[in-house]
C-alpha cells in the first residue's frame, strides 16, 4: 500500500472526499514528523510510538577498499509497535 492507496482507504472509511482525506493524512504525517524531529515522543495507543533515537559515532569500513572510516553520530527516527498492532499483524 502506498500513500495514494492509504488516502483512498481513509477517504472511504471516514466518508471524506479524496482531497479532504489527503489533507488530513498530510496533516497527521507532518505533525508526527515535526514532533519527532523536535525530540518529542508521539504515542498512539494501540498502534505504536514514534521517537527520535541517537546513534553514536562509530568506526566502519569502506566495503570496496577495506579502509576504516569514521561514521558521525546522528539522530534517526524510531518506531515501536503497540500491542494491538502487533497482535493484528501476528494474526
Image: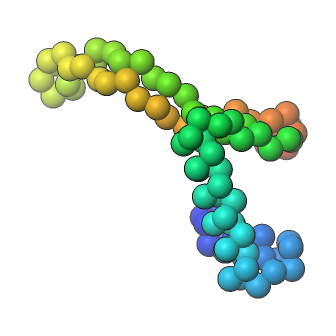
Residue at 63%, 45% (x, y): give it.
35
Toward the front, the furthest residue is 38
- The N terminus, quarter of image: bottom right
Q: Is residue 11 visible?
A: yes
Residue situated in front as seen by the camera: 38 or 19: 38
Residue at 60%, 64% (x, y): give it.
2
Residue at 71%, 41% (x, y): give it.
42
Q: Quadrant of residue 73?
A: top left
Whether 62 is drawn above or below 41: the answer is above
Whether 81 is drawn above or below 33: the answer is above
Side (left or right) of 39 relative to 20 = left
x and y percent of residue 34 in the render?
58, 50
Q: Is residue 90 visible?
A: no
Residue situated in front as seen by the camera: 24 or 4: 24
Q: Quadrant of residue 8?
A: bottom right
x and y percent of residue 69 in the render?
20, 20
Residue at 63%, 66% (x, y): give it.
26
x and y percent of residue 80 in the render?
70, 33
- The C terminus, quarter of image: top right
Residue situated in front as seen by the camera: 13 or 25: 25
Side (left or right) of 8 relative to 29 = right
- Visual colour scheme: rainbow
Q: Quadrant of residue 52?
A: top right
x and y percent of residue 89 in the render?
79, 42
Side (left or right) of 15 relative to 33 = right
Amino acid at each position: 500500500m502506498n500513500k495514494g492507496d492509504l488516502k483512498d482507504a481513509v477517504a472511504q472509511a471516514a466518508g471524506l472526499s479524496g482531497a479532504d482525506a489527503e489533507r488530513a493524512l498530510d496533516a497527521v504525517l507532518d505533525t508526527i514528523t515535526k514532533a519527532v524531529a523536535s525530540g518529542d515522543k508521539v504515542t498512539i495507543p494501540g498502534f505504536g510510538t514514534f521517537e527520535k533515537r541517537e546513534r553514536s559515532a562509530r568506526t566502519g569500513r569502506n566495503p570496496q577498499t577495506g579502509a576504516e572510516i569514521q561514521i558521525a553520530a546522528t539522530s534517526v527516527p524510531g518506531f515501536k509497535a503497540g500491542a494491538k498492532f502487533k497482535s493484528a499483524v501476528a494474526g
